[in-house]
Image (spheres, rainbow, N blue to C red):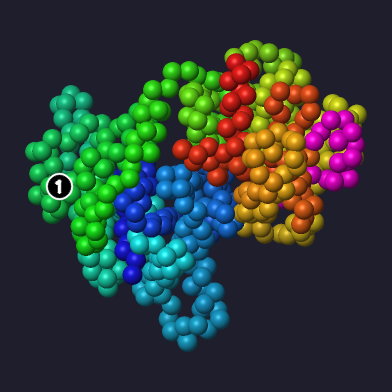
Amino acid sequence: MSKFVFVTGGVVSGLGKGITASSLALLLKARGYKVFMQKFDPYINVDPGTMSPFQHGEVYVTADGTETDLDLGHYERFIDEELNYTSNITTGKIYQSVIEKERKGDYLGATVQIVPHITDEIKSKIYAAASTSGADIVITEIGGTIGDIESQAFIESLRQMRNELGKENTLFVHATLVPYIYGSNELKTKPTQHSVIELRGMGIQPDLIVCRSPEELNQHLKEKISLFCSVPTENVIDSIDVKNIFWVPLNYLKQGMDELVLKQFKLPITESKIKYWQDLVNKVDNLKEEVEIALVGKYVELHDAYLSVNESLKHAGYANNVRVKVNWINSEDLEKMDSLDEVFKTTSGILVPGGFGSRGIEGKIKAINYARTHNIPFLGICLGMQLAVIEFARNVCGLPNASSTEFNEVCKDPIIDLMAEQKGIINKGGTLRLGNYDCKIKEGTLAFEDYKILEIKERHRHRYEFNNKYKELLASKGMVFSGINEKADLVEIIELKNHPHFIACQFHPEFKSRPTRPHPLFNSFIRESIKHK
C-alpha cells in the first residue's frame, strides 16, 4: 500500500510549499523509492486552462494532456517523473464530479453534502493517484493557506485519511513563516504557533514543521516551536533563503527530513544517491560567463507566465556553462518603434514563446524579422512558430496580407488557420490540442542535428495550425519543414536555410526540459547564442 505525505501551508501564501514538496520527493526518490506528486487547488475553476496568465502564471501541460497549475512544472523538473490527470485536482473538478453523479442518481436519492460526499470524492482522487502511479509514496500539496474557507473540505478529507490509515501511512508537513523583526532584531515564532493552532482546530496535528525564515533557527527557537506545537525538536526543519532553489533539497537532506519521513512510515533508510544533484548545485553556483536572451512576449510583467520557458533557458545554460540573463521585452512596446537596434544591441538570441489573442502580435513579428534579417539565433514556440511563418510569408514570399484567422477571420492569406477538429467547438476549457503527439524528424536538418533521432513525442497546447496550402510556396523560398505529425499532416517544426540558427516548433519543448537534462532545442539555441555573443 502507498504511503501518503500531505503538505500544507500557514501564515501567508508564497512560502514555497511546492518547492518543499518537490524537494522531499527528490530526496525520497534518491533513496530508491517510487514517488508521485499531486496538487490540490482550492479555486472553483475546473482547471487553470482558461485563467489569465496575469492572475495565475503559466498553464503547465502533462504528457496525457491535462492542463495544470504551474507547481506541477516544479514537481516534474525536480523528480523527473511524468505526472498525469490525477496530479492536479481543483475544487471545481470535485464539485463537477459530485454533481454529475447526483444527476445520474448514483447517490440513490440521498441528500448530497460536503461530508461525506465531497470529502469522499477528494479522498478518491488521492487513492487514484496512488493506484495509477503505483508509487511507494504519494506527496500531495494543498494550495492556499490554513484558515482559508476554500480549502476546508480538503483539510477535512486529510483528517479522515489520518483517522482511517494511521500515522504509519500518513504524514503531515506544515510550512510556516518565522519572520525576522527589524528593530528588535529577532526571529518570531508566534505566527507559526498560531498557524499550528488553526490546523489543530481542524483536527490535524502536523508531524513536521518547515519554518521559512531568512536565517537558521537556533536550538532555543526550535525547542520553543516543539513545545508549543507538540512535535519533536528534530522535526522542526529550517527552510532558509538560498541563492538558488536547487539548494533546498540539500538543506533538507542535511537536517534528515527524508529520514524522519521514512522512520514514521517504518520504511528502510537506504543509501541516498544524491551526488548528481550536488554536482548540479556546484555547477550553478560557479558559473562565470553570461549570455543575454531576449524573451519577447505580452505577459512579461509576470515572469511566472513564462516560468517553464525561463527555467528551460537556465537548464540549457547550465549544460553550456553559462548563466542565462533573460531580457524581458513587452512586444507591444516594439510596435511603436521604428528601429529595434537599441532594444537588441546586447542580445545574443531572441525567443518568442506561446500565447493567445491578437494583442502585441505585430511587435513579436517585428522581433522575428529582426532575428531573421540580422542573423541572430532564434527560437519560436507555438505561437512563436506561427508568427515566424507569417513573417516569412509577408516579407520573403510576397504575401503582405498573410496572417492567422485567430487575429483576422477574413484575412486574404490565412497562413495559420483553425484546426479542422477545432471548428464548431464552443467551450474553451480543455478543448485545445493537448498533450503528447508524435513528430517525424527529417534527416539532414537542424532539428535532426538537435534530437539525433527520427521520431519524437512532444507536448502541445494550441488550436490553430500551419495551413498546408502554402507549404510549397514557402519551401521554394527557403523554409524547411523539418518536423511533421504524419497522422494529422501537421507541421511541427520549421527552420530556415542560410541562417546561423533559426528554428521554431508548434509544440512546447519547455515542458520536457530538466535541470540535469535540458531540452535539445533549448540546448542548441543557447549554444548558438553563445557563439553569436
Residue at 91% over, 29% down: 398
- Residue 371 in view (yes/no): no
Residue 95 to residue 239: above or below: below
Residue 459 to residue 90: above or below: above
Residue 250 shown left or right of residue 523 in the figure: left
**Considering the numbered disc 1 on the image, is that residue within a helix, a strand or a loop?**
helix
Q: Position of residue 428 (x, y in %)?
A: 66, 55
Residue at 66% over, 54% down: 437
Q: Total number of numbered labels?
A: 1
Residue at 90% over, 37% down: 473
> Where does the magenta region start and end?
461-480
- Residue 340 in view (yes/no): yes
Residue at 61% over, 30% down: 524
Most extreme residue toward the bottom, as rendered? 108
Q: Amino acid at mark 1?
A: Glu
Is 519 included in the stretch rendered in magenta?
A: no
Given residues 250 and 182, the one toward you in this image is: 250
Given residues 335 and 500, the one toward you in this image is: 500
Question: Which residue bears the numbered disc 1?
Answer: 234
Q: Position of residue 226 (x, y in %)?
A: 12, 48
Q: Quadrant of the C terminus?
A: top right
Q: Position of residue 364 (x, y in %)?
A: 70, 29
Quadrant location of residue 396?
top right
Q: Position of residue 176 (x, y in %)?
A: 26, 45
